[in-house]
């Protein structure tokens, strides 16, 4: 029995319903659009969900539970546990431009990292982690990673510069370097920054501008990372100078500015503190958060913090 309408994506609609086959429990039903591409994507998502759910029988690792699926008029329909809202909506409602309390961010970060742990254990890349694809329950205490429509098996991934929503896209994707689980860690870090500040961390309008914004925080990319990239020539010259595609303020045309040095212009600590007079215990947590983000946003994916080190990081381990 359908009683509500949650939202519409490019690939599907989601409705809220009561499942009469299961004692009228509340469920969310994702109805996949009936065309060949969406249908194939839907079946792939189904496979991924089954794999994840099977690998976490006790539901401890924060990936959305699929209850069952069926076909209705040739539409694939997936029946999920019901969840209240996504983190984009939570931010809008409770943290507009200011973000959430560091206590909530600590808890959400831990849960998100556990979801990444399950992905790694099953050899799956989510490849679209962002606040919109993370749901919370009524009490807002429990988080679940959802929307596995872009997910793939780690060794079956193809090099494409447009994987992952742009603001959450890791440098190795943009440069065309073979990638692995570290892309989800990058997206998670961008998401966590946004949960705490209420602001998007890297809001580039193109892949080229994304690279510039990364360097504003991290400084110039290491040459050895640049040289690995299949798409490096779009963004760097032969001497690894950055080719910044800028819009000329006067002519409004695009011009290419060659930058041999990119200075660090952003300071994470001051962005996180944002002029707040924080009590010492909160300031300590925020400083730990900054350290975790620095490590999760290593430009070189090989140097990015591992899941186990992230889960044992003081930001997660020290209760506030």
Image: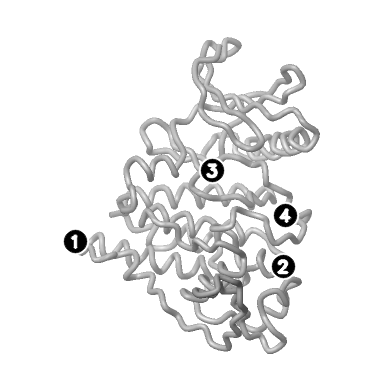
Q: Which of 252 and 277 is in front in this view?
A: 252
Q: Which of marks 1 and 3 is in front?
A: 3
In 3D space, how far apart are the residues under numbered discs 2 and 3 (Cα atoms)? 24 Å
Name the outermost residue toward the right: 36
**Dot 2: element:** loop
Q: Earlier in the sequence, mark 4 or mark 2?
A: 4
Instruction: Tell me the crowding category of disc 3: few under 14, some 14 to 19, or many 20 or more residues within 10 angstroms, Cα based.
Output: some
Q: Which of 311 and 250 is in front in this view?
A: 250
Query: Residue 133 got which mark?
Result: 3
Q: Residue under circle 2? A: 176
Q: Residue under circle 1? A: 279
In 3D space, how far apart are the residues under numbered discs 4 and 2 (Cα atoms)? 15 Å
Instruction: Tell me the crowding category of disc 2: few under 14, some 14 to 19, or many 20 or more residues within 10 angstroms, Cα based.
Output: some
Q: In screen coordinates, is 50 left or right of 99? A: right
Q: Earlier in the sequence, mark 4 or mark 1?
A: 4
Q: Earlier in the sequence, mark 1 or mark 3?
A: 3
**Dot 4: element:** helix
């Amino acid at each position: 029995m359908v009683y509500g309408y949650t939202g519409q994506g490019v690939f599907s609609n989601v409705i809220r319903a009561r499942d009469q086959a299961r004692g009228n429990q509340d469920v969310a039903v994702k109805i996949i659009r009936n065309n060949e591409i969406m249908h194939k994507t839907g079946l792939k998502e189904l496979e991924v969900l089954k794999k994840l759910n099977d690998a976490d029988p006790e539901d401890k690792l924060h990936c959305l539970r699929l209850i069952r699926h069926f076909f209705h008029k040739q539409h694939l329909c997936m029946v999920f546990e019901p969840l209240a809202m996504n983190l984009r909506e939570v931010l809008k409602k409770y943290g507009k431009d200011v973000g959430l309390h560091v206590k909530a961010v600590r808890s959400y970060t831990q849960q998100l990292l556990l979801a990444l742990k399950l992905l790694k254990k099953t050899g799956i890349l989510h490849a679209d982690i962002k606040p919109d694809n993370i749901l919370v329950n009524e009490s807002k205490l429990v988080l679940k990673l959802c929307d596995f429509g872009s997910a793939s098996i780690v060794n079956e991934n193809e090099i494409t510069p447009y994987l992952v929503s742009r603001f959450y896209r890791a440098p190795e994707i943009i440069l065309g370097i073979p990638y692995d689980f570290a892309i989800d860690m990058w997206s998670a870090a961008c998401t966590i920054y946004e949960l705490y500040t209420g602001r998007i961390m890297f809001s580039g309008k193109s892949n080229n501008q994304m690279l510039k914004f990364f360097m504003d925080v991290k400084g110039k990319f290491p040459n050895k990372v640049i040289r690995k990239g299949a798409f490096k020539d779009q963004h760097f010259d032969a001497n690894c100078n950055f080719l910044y595609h800028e819009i000329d303020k006067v002519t409004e045309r695009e011009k290419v500015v060659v930058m041999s040095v990119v200075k660090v212009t952003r300071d994470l600590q001051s962005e996180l503190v944002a002029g707040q007079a924080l009590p010492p215990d909160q300031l300590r947590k925020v400083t730990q958060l900054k350290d975790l983000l620095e490590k999760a946003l290593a430009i070189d994916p090989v140097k990015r913090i591992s899941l186990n080190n992230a889960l044992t990081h003081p930001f997660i381990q020290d209760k506030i």
